[in-house]
Amino acid sequence: MNKYKIAESIVTQLLQDLQTRMNSGTKWDVSDENIQAEVTDKWEDIIIAEIEKSEK
């Protein structure tokens, strides 16, 4: 998988997560340290999964 496809997939998933948070009323205020940590962890997981998928 080329790096542009990987980047596109990651960005798409991040935007989907953000849209889901906004539409569901889920708190996503990144100025809150706990929320920032939760979002960071989830988005790191998305990125790592895509990298691992591309290495197979």
Image (cartoon, grey):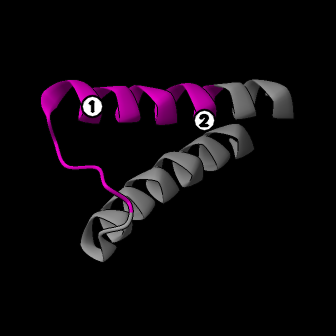
Badge 1 or badge 2: first in the primary sequence: 2
Picture coordinates of residue 36, whole percent (x, y): 37, 65
**Disc 2 residue type?**
Ile
Picture coordinates of residue 46, whole percent (x, y): 49, 46
Quadrant in which the C terminus is drawn: top right
Based on the displayed image, in which of its 4 quarters is residue 40 positioned?
bottom left
Is 40 rendered above or below residue 13?
below
Picture coordinates of residue 22, whole percent (x, y): 27, 31
**Disc 1 residue type?**
Met
Queried whether the magenta region covers residue 34, the answer comes back as no
Element marked by disc 1? helix
In this orientation, which residue lies closer to the viewer: 24 or 6? 24
In the image as oriented, which residue stretches furthest toward the left? 25
Q: Residue under label 1, please give it.
A: 22
Say whether residue 24 is visible.
Answer: yes
Q: Is residue 55 rendered to the left or right of residue 27?
A: right
Nearer to us of marks 1 and 2 is 1
Q: Is residue 6 rendered to the left or right of residue 34?
A: right
What residue is shown at x 40% (from left), y 63% (from top)?
A: 41
Per the rendered image, the range of residues in magenta is 9-30
Q: Is residue 31 rendered to the left or right of residue 44?
A: left
Is 19 rendered above or below residue 32?
above
Say whether residue 2 is visible.
Answer: no
Based on the displayed image, in which of its 4 quarters is residue 30 positioned?
bottom left
Picture coordinates of residue 54, whole percent (x, y): 70, 39
Quadrant in which the N terminus is drawn: top right
What residue is shown at x 22% (from left), y 24% (from top)?
A: 23
Residue 10: numbered disc:
2
